[in-house]
Image (cartoon, rainbow, N blue to C red):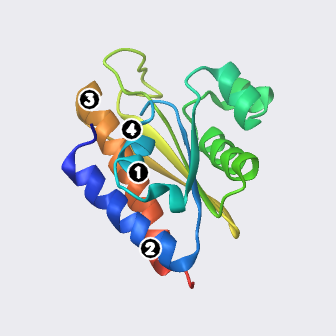
Amino acid sequence: MADAALVALAERLQHACIGRGLTVATAESCTGGLVAEAITSVPGSSAYFVGALVTYADEAKAALLGVPAGLLARHGAVSAEVAAAMAAGARDRLGTSLAVSITGVAGPDGGSAAKPVGLTYLGLATAAGVETRQHQFGGDRAGNRDAAARAALQSLVDHAERAVG
């Protein structure tokens, strides 16, 4: 079950989305569905939440979200470019107003000097386009995944609460 802070953000998101007629999808890699779990922990989430794609492997990112293989090869899965493509793919394929993506190095292994453990990129796709944000979380695997899920939900909440209904 999602922690209380994630559920509280999901409740805010639900209120903002339903009040403004917005729909949401998620494309998650390193969080493994934590954002979708928090959203669906709130009764009534089916009124705005369309679905989630957990695309851990590069092949899943390409097949399910339409992330170009060349983009993955050039930049790697943990990159702003791939986060943007994931978010755009989720929004397009699930037909939503908003889509958020998360890709990162949760740890404890898999990091490098160029892409250390905790490095995470978020993408937010809207009708206006896609924006990405880079984060460097400093926790263990569970902490990094939780921090990424919080940041993704906060990004959705911030956009939804600013949107005109």
Asked where in the image residue 33 lies, by quadrant, the reply is top left
Q: Determine whether label 1 and label 3 are within 8 Å by CB.
A: no
Q: Where is residue 5 in the image (x, y as percent from the top left)?
A: 22, 53
Amino acid at the residue labelled 2: Ala
Distance CA(mark 2)–CA(mark 1): 13 Å
Residue 110 lies left or right of residue 60; in this view the side is left
Observer able to see residue 124:
no
Q: Which of marks 4 and 1 is nearer the N terminus?
A: 4
Mark 2 or 1, nearer chain start: 2
Rounded to the nearest whole Å, what is the CA distance between mark 1 and mark 3? 18 Å
Spatial separation of the CA atoms under disc 4 and disc 3? 11 Å
Q: Earlier in the sequence, mark 4 or mark 3?
A: 4
Crowding at mark 3 (Cα within 10 Å: few <14, some 14-19, many 20+)? few
Residue drawn 52% across the image and 62% down it: 47
Mark closest to the chain's N terminus, 3 or 2: 2
Q: Name the residue under label 3.
A: 142
152 left or right of 164 in image: left
Report the residue at 62% width, 27% height from top.
76
Foreground tag (3 vs 2): 2
**Quick one: SS at disc 3?**
helix
CB within 8 Å, label 4 to label 2: no
Q: What residue type is labelled 1?
A: Ile
Q: Quickly name the residue at label 4.
A: 34
State the residue in front, 61 or 109. 61
Q: Is mark 1 on a helix, strand or loop?
A: helix
Which mark, by number, is residue 39?
1
Whether 58 is drawn above or below 80: the answer is above
Q: In which quarter of the image is the C terminus?
A: bottom right
Question: Would you say 56 lies left or right of 137 here?
Answer: right
The quadrant holding residue 132 is bottom right
Viewer-side label of 4, 3 = 4
Amino acid type assigned to the residue bearing label 4 in the image:
Leu
